[in-house]
Image: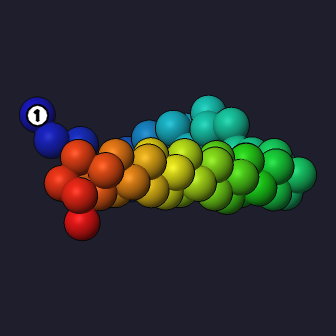
């Protein structure tokens, strides 16, 4: 059975109250970590790309 709109809104408020919202510091730290890990990943794959290109140039003789 469907709940009436008032009951639905009360249930929504109850569920939202259970959510653990991150603090500003937690958001800042996780954002910084994402940027650091993205930079490290980009650096790693760039180095792998350079090594593969160098190896292929040696094999092909270009």
Q: Residue at x 61, y 38 (%)?
A: 19
Q: Is residue 28 above or below residue 17?
A: below
The extreme front residue here reads 61
Camera-nearest residue between 22 and 54: 54
Q: Residue at x 59, y 54 (%)?
A: 43
Please, what secondary structure does the residue beneath circle 1 have? loop
Badge 1: residue crowd in 10 Å (few <14, some 14–19, many ≥20): few
53 relative to 1 in the view: left or right = right
Q: Position of residue 40 (x, y in %)?
A: 64, 49
6 relative to 36 in the view: left or right = left
| Res. 49 visible in picture | no
Q: Position of residue 29 (x, y in %)?
A: 82, 49
The extreme right residue here reads 25
Residue highlighted by disc 1 = 1
Quadrant for residue 7, please give it: top left
Q: How many marks?
A: 1
Camera-nearest residue between 27 and 10: 27
Q: Position of residue 2 (x, y in %)?
A: 15, 41
User: Which image quadrant: the C terminus?
Assistant: bottom left
């Amino acid at each position: 059975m469907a709940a009436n709109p008032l009951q639905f809104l009360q249930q929504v408020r109850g569920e939202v109250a259970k959510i653990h919202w991150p603090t500003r510091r937690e958001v800042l730290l996780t954002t910084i970590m994402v940027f650091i890990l993205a930079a490290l990943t980009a650096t790693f794959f760039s180095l792998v790309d350079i090594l593969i290109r160098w190896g292929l140039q040696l094999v092909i003789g270009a």
